[in-house]
Image (spheres, grey):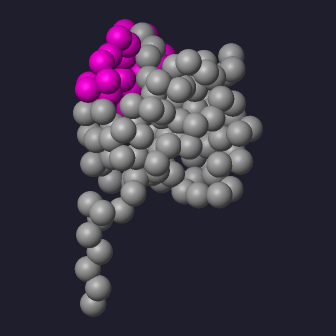
Amino acid sequence: MTVVDHSLMKTTILLLVSDPVVRSILKETLEREGYTVLASGDLGQAVDWLKECTPDLLITRTYVESLPGHEAAMYLRTKCLGMRVLMLGGLLDDERLQYRATQQGFEVFPKPYSAAALLQEVRHVLSKPHG
């Protein structure tokens, strides 16, 4: 029986952020930590990435191209079952956002945040079993 050391496996993150500056900074931050990052500025491009691979995690913002982030995440999850989801930003005291996130098994990480705090949250979400 072969034992696979999962710590040596490359983790792939699909990053769906429409703002090009924020997307670039997030991509660079995640790649410096050793993650493979598939950066997308729109839902169509994100769907195209899913045709090529199966990401471990989707990171998106609460709104993408005037589409609620949870709707984009739910749609992408239909293409990649079990993909973990981390939504950045949002008002945590907004009961609607919390309800939607809880119902779909998404994690919500509020703004503002530091790179170190974001990376810690990414590791935390990735440590959870697939949804």
Q: Position of residue 87 (x, y in %)?
A: 45, 28
Q: Is residue 12 left or right of residue 107?
A: right
Q: Position of residue 42 (x, y in %)?
A: 69, 30
Q: Do we see residue 101 in this rendering?
A: no
Query: Which residue does the image show at 36% across and 17% down from the upper left?
Result: 110
Q: Which residues are magenta?
A: 92-118
Q: Is residue 84 above or below residue 6?
A: above
Query: Which residue does the image show at 53% across and 36% down from the upper left?
Result: 15
State the quadrant of the N terminus.
bottom left
Nearer to us in this view, 48 or 31: 31
Query: Which residue does the image show at 48% across and 33% down from the upper left?
Result: 27
Q: Is residue 111 left or right of residue 73?
A: left
Nearer to us in this view, 44 or 27: 27
Q: Is residue 82 above or below residue 90?
A: below
Q: Is residue 45 left or right of residue 98?
A: right
43 drawn magenta: no
Q: Do we see residue 107 in this rendering?
A: yes
